[in-house]
Structures are given as C-alpha cells and as structure tokens.
Image: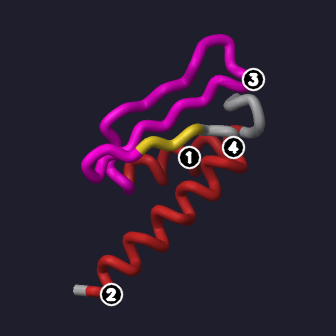
Amino acid sequence: MPDAFYEQSKREARLRALAEKLEFNVERHSGRFTLTRTIDVEKPEREDNLTLEQAEKLLETWKLRGPHGG
C-alpha cells in the first residue's frame, strides 16, 4: 500500500507543477481538485470536483491547445 500512496503523491506533485507552468491555481478538498485559471482568459476558467485523473487530463489538453487555450 505505501507504493500506491507514493505514486499518488508523485502524480499530484506533477499535476501541481504543470498547473503552475500553465498558470492554474490548484486546490484539493477531500481527494478532489479544483483548477482555476484567471490569467489570459476572458472570464475565469474553473473546474470543480475533479479526480486526479480528470485534473491531469484537463491540464494536458490545455497544454496542447497552447498558451491561450486555443
């Protein structure tokens, strides 16, 4: 079980590093994540109640779309 916890911690650290690079704020509440971006967007981009997998996917998609999300 410690390996699963360690892997989860590494994934969360990577998520936070990517979020910082893409200028997203990350909040964690009871194992769920909220991602918010207010820089270079017309209105704030906010996704709530995401699993780690969903948050990773959202950031990867944003990264592929480029600096302005499009």
First reached walking from the N terminus: tag 4 or tag 1: 4
Query: Against 18, is 45 above or below?
Result: above
Percent across and percent down for residue 67 are 77, 36
Q: CA distance from mark 3 to mark 2?
A: 38 Å
Amino acid bearing label 4: Leu
The residue lying at 48 percent from left, 73 percent from top is 10
Name the residue beneath numbered marker 1: 59
The residue lying at 38 percent from left, 55 percent from top is 53
User: Which quarter shows the C terminus?
Assistant: top right
The residue furthest top is 42
Q: Is residue 69 left or right of residue 1?
A: right
Q: Which mark is residue 24?
A: none
> The residue tagged with tag 4: helix, strand or loop?
loop
Q: Residue 48: say if magenta.
A: yes
Q: CA distance from mark 4 to mark 3?
A: 11 Å
First reached walking from the N terminus: tag 3 or tag 2: 2
**The one of 9 and 64 positioned closer to us in this rendering:** 9
Q: Which mark is residue 40?
A: 3
Percent across and percent down for residue 49 are 31, 37
Percent across and percent down for residue 1 are 22, 86
Q: Which mark is residue 3?
A: 2
The residue lying at 56 percent from left, 64 percent from top is 14
Query: Against 1, is 17 above or below?
Result: above
Q: CA distance from mark 4 to mark 2?
A: 29 Å
> The residue tagged with tag 3: helix, strand or loop?
loop
At label 3, counting other C-alpha atoms closer than 10 Å, the crowd grade (few under 14, some 14-19, many 20 or more) is few
Q: Residue 13: say if magenta.
A: no
Amino acid bearing label 1: Leu
Give the residues drawn in magenta, as a range: 28-52
Q: CA distance from mark 4 to mark 1?
A: 8 Å
